[in-house]
Amino acid sequence: MRLLQALFFPPEQPGGVSSMIPYLQERFNSPRWEMELFSLPKRIRNKGSEEIRFDTFDWTQYGESPIVQKYIQTFRDYLWWIKLRIHKPYDLIHAHHPIAGLAMKKAFPATPLIQTIHSSYERELILNGKIEENGLEHRFLTSLYGELEHAADCMLTVSESFRTYMSPYVKSPEKIGIVPNGFDEKRFKPIPHENEVPQLVTVCRLVPAKGIDVLFEACCELKKRGHDYVLHIIGDGPIRSELEELAQQLGIYNETIFYGYTLHPEEFVPFFDIFVLPSRAEAFGSVFAEAALSSLALVGTDVGGISEQIEDGVNGLLVPKDNAVALADALEKVIQDPLYRYELARSASEKAKTEYSLRRSVHMLKKLYLKFEPAN
């Protein structure tokens, strides 16, 4: 069976999709399966010129928005790149971005399409202050869910919470399947260690949606309470300079280390003790599963896919979003009690190995793919 995994970003880019898709190939390496990856290189810009039309709505009513215009041009570029690069047929296409799925269906209308929605671009833009809720861009981006439902032969997402989020924008939400991101356990090697000072770590893109400002306020509170710690920030983004300035204003700069973007954080995350990320929204939250497989204690916000991964007090701690005091209280619990921290980490690791293993995701996908296997 000839399979094409259609990504948007190249597979080496950080993010939830890259946590699973590039590792699928070796698991599908058998005479029965032939899998290839496809993505749009960053250098491809403003190449496409084809007229874009959707079947379920008229995108031009939102066309005065520069963000919408950029999105449509990226669609054209992706379609141009498909026609330039793909010269053989596939039995099935599995797309992991709306542009990838819609462009593939336009180029190959007779080929079955599975579409996975991994996250919400519109929600990220709202939380990061780039667009307004119910504005032109928001309405355009949410209209795409209905277009994807119309185009795809099968719709998937990564968590129950995100299926609920999409429900108002599609006709048959009950038909959307759930396949969580899967993680190759061989990449994660817990390392026995004893840090005299508790080491906190977060891995994320530095944007407002990730709530790092709330984390800094919580760390300031911890310092006021007399707790020693070191906070490691792995990742980069547009608000890094603002966060560095905030750390200085709050008096926690000396306790905070900014690493910038790191390609393989799993190589040194196991040396830390506590993973914390107070996101304001997450469709799944791959970094929590990765931290669990590295045997770190988890502290996160009670939102989206995070609350599906963490059972509060059992395999991690959950706090309300935008609540620095509650976050400080949770961090204080795991800082003060190493044994409790260990028990949370052990439970988190066991759940991640059971529910978020690459083996389980591959098994689910193979069963689904076989439904589209062409008859001999």
Image: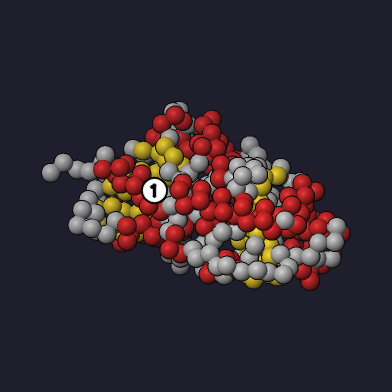
Residue 70 visible in this rendered orientation of the protein: no
According to the picture, the residue beneath numbered tag 1 turns out to be: 360
Q: In the image, is residue 124 above or below residue 19?
A: above
Secondary-structure class at tag 1: helix
Q: Residue at x 76, y 54 (%)?
A: 332
Q: Residue at x 39, y 35 (%)?
A: 150
Position of the C terminus, as image quadrant, is top left
- How crowded pointer 1 is (Cα within 10 Å; few <14, some 14-19, many 20+) is rated as some
The amino acid on which the numbered mark 1 sits, given as a three-letter code, is Arg
Q: Position of residue 20 (x, y in %)?
A: 43, 56
- Compare residues 368 and 146 and report the one nearer the observer: 368
Q: Position of residue 197 (x, y in %)?
A: 73, 68
Q: In the image, is residue 59 above or below residue 13?
A: above
Could you tell whether 125 is left or right of 243 in the image? left
Q: Residue at x 74, y 63 (%)?
A: 243
Residue 254 visible in this rendered orientation of the protein: yes
Q: Position of residue 140 (x, y in %)?
A: 54, 40
Q: Position of residue 189 (x, y in %)?
A: 50, 65
Give the quarter of the image for residue 275.
bottom right
Q: Residue at x 63, y 56 (%)?
A: 342
- Name the colouring of the figure: secondary structure
Could you tell whether 364 is left or right of 188 in the image? left
